[in-house]
Amino acid sequence: MYEYLIAVFAYIFIYIILVVSLNLAFGFTGLVNLGHMAFFGVGAYASALLTLHGIPWYIALPASGLIAGSFGAVIAAITVRLKGDYFQIVALGLAFIAIAVSRNWISLTRGALGLPGIPDIIKNNFYYMLFLFAVALLSVVFLYWLTNSETGKIFQAIRDDETAAAVLGKNTYLYKVLSITISTFFAGIAGSLFAHYISFIDPTIFDLEFFVIILAMLIVGGLASISGSILGVTVISLLLSAISFVFTNISPELIGAMRQMLLMLILLLILIYRPRGMFGKVDV
Amino acid sequence: MPLLDILPQLIVNGLIAGSIYALAASGFSLIYYVVKFQYFSHGAIMSIGAYLFFTFMNLMGLNYILAGILTVIGCVIATLLSNWLLYLPLRKRKATPAIILIASIVLLIFSSSLMLAFFGSSTKAISLAKHNKTFDFGIFTITLVQTAIIVSALILFLFLWIILKKTKLGKSMRALADNKDVAQVVGINPEKIYNYTFIIAAVLGAFGGILLGLEQNLYPRMGVPIIIKGFISSVVGGLGSVPGSIIGGLFIGLAENVGVLYLPTGYKDVISFSVLLLFLLFRPQGILGVKMRNV
């Protein structure tokens, strides 16, 4: 029970970083990045490969953030200039391309077999959870400061009315690239922390099934609200763990299906009836 | 054996896969063209089609024509329900296309867990063995079922073309796609036309699902990979163009299979995703050159 609770909270802290970073692009800047998990996965694979090749974690962790962030910067630089659906389509296409690369670049990723034996950052799970708490706290404080700064105000102005922001002399293109870069940097950090926690990653990390859980946390919490994201992650994580606890006599396969159905149903109801989620500042 | 000797067989295999991709892509593209969002739950309808056909054929022992009719009816009902319960309320509250896209992905994942809960994770096969035989043309072989896949896809595309180009309904759909406000002024009721559009997409999805189920095994999340291929085909063909999506589907099917000449078979996905990447970077308007819509 004690170990289980530690695991639940370890995941909560990792997902907080991931969801708050998605909120920066999606909620605060209005960039619907459906490829966010690709950057999480890139961070996880980068950190796993670096540490498996003997590089210490304190280099691999920031490096995976930088690698994911540079990918994000390049993709954003190419795509956000174009109007319409283009960014959204490329972001989603990118997530699918990441699946194909991780499955088929066998010499690097071992394909569907995945990468086992990723070294721990801290052996003791309790202390690792505290470490995750510290990193999550730092990320949240930084993103809170950012979204309340001048830059954050411009992000939100772009979301609300890009033409008006441009008329006021803001280079909206650069601000959008900046938002995606910071957002994907933190996705990479979260991916790295995740890989070192579960010590095994495979291409399912890029699956839509995983991404919709993250989306549920974001949208239930509410767009453009950091406290909403934190609450969204906590509520959904506790709900999902509670289901596994209550129905111990049902096969794990069926529980998985039930959990997923329930979560998707909640998400659809929120999308239709309560587009601001719990604490959102804007409608989804 | 020289590699080129197997080329005719690879082209036939490419057409079989491509027909199914084109069915996934045409439904996706039709909704994108008329209702203006990326319709990922078309994959859910295809998997429901495959599982319904399996239920009627193998579990209830109906003949394939009756099973096919019931499957189409089932898919139409499921599609209309998804429109009335999900997409219509979202349109009413003026949700952006991105949000409707997210809802359609959520519905896709919902349906795959529903299939898992109903049918379990083990793979199923629709057995048509007693109807099947193989034709040997020397340079390639093809089974009766595979011939049926290509022929029925072609018939469906012909019908789709006739509806879009030659009927009043098609005219209304095109008017709505071009400019919703003007269409409403001339007396077109958008919601009515949307319903018909969803019904047409449901028929494409039902047949797409049945044909997919004949060509491969059934498993709960089968709707996810096929609609990803449908998405890729639509982007490659030109997003928002129904004929483009059919060309894109055949192109991706052929590229994956003919690519086997140069790459191991495990690289089929790499081929289609590389094609997607090249198109996204260098020709986002797709083969048919459809201009990106400004939404």
Image (spheres, coloured by chain):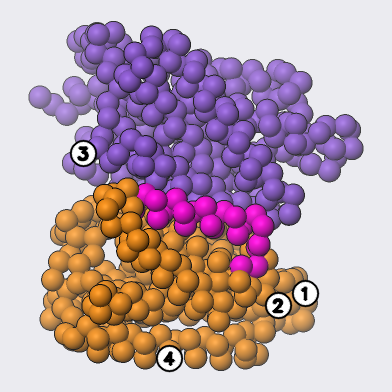
Chain colours: A orange, B purple
Question: What is the magenta range?
Answer: A256-277
Residue B236 in view: no
Q: Amino acid at mark 1?
A: Ala
Nearest to viewer (mark 4 / mark 2): 4
Nearest to viewer (mark 3 / mark 4): 4
- The residue at which mark 2 appears reads as A157
User: Magenta region's main secondary structure?
Assistant: helix
Q: Quadrant of the C terminus of chain B?
A: bottom right
- The residue at which mark 3 appears reads as B265
Q: CA distance from mark 4 to mark 2?
A: 25 Å
* Crowd band around label 3 with a 10 angstrom C-alpha radius: few (<14), some (14–19), many (20+): few
Q: Earlier in the sequence, mark 1 or mark 2?
A: 2
Q: Is residue B282 above or below residue B209?
A: below
- The residue at which mark 4 appears reads as A138
Q: Earlier in the sequence, mark 4 or mark 1?
A: 4
The residue drawn where x is 51% and y is 77% is A231
Residue A270: say if magenta.
Answer: yes
* Crowd band around label 4 with a 10 angstrom C-alpha radius: few (<14), some (14–19), many (20+): few
Q: CA distance from mark 4 to mark 1?
A: 33 Å
Q: Is residue B68 above or below residue B228?
A: above
Disc 2, SS: helix
The residue drawn where x is 33% and y is 56% is A247
Q: What is the chain letter for disc 2?
A: A
Q: Amino acid at mark 4?
A: Leu
- The residue at which mark 1 appears reads as A164
Is mark 1 in CB contact (under 8 Å) with mark 2?
yes
Q: Are marks 3 and 2 on the same chain?
A: no
Q: Amino acid at mark 2?
A: Ala
Q: CA distance from mark 1 to mark 3?
A: 52 Å
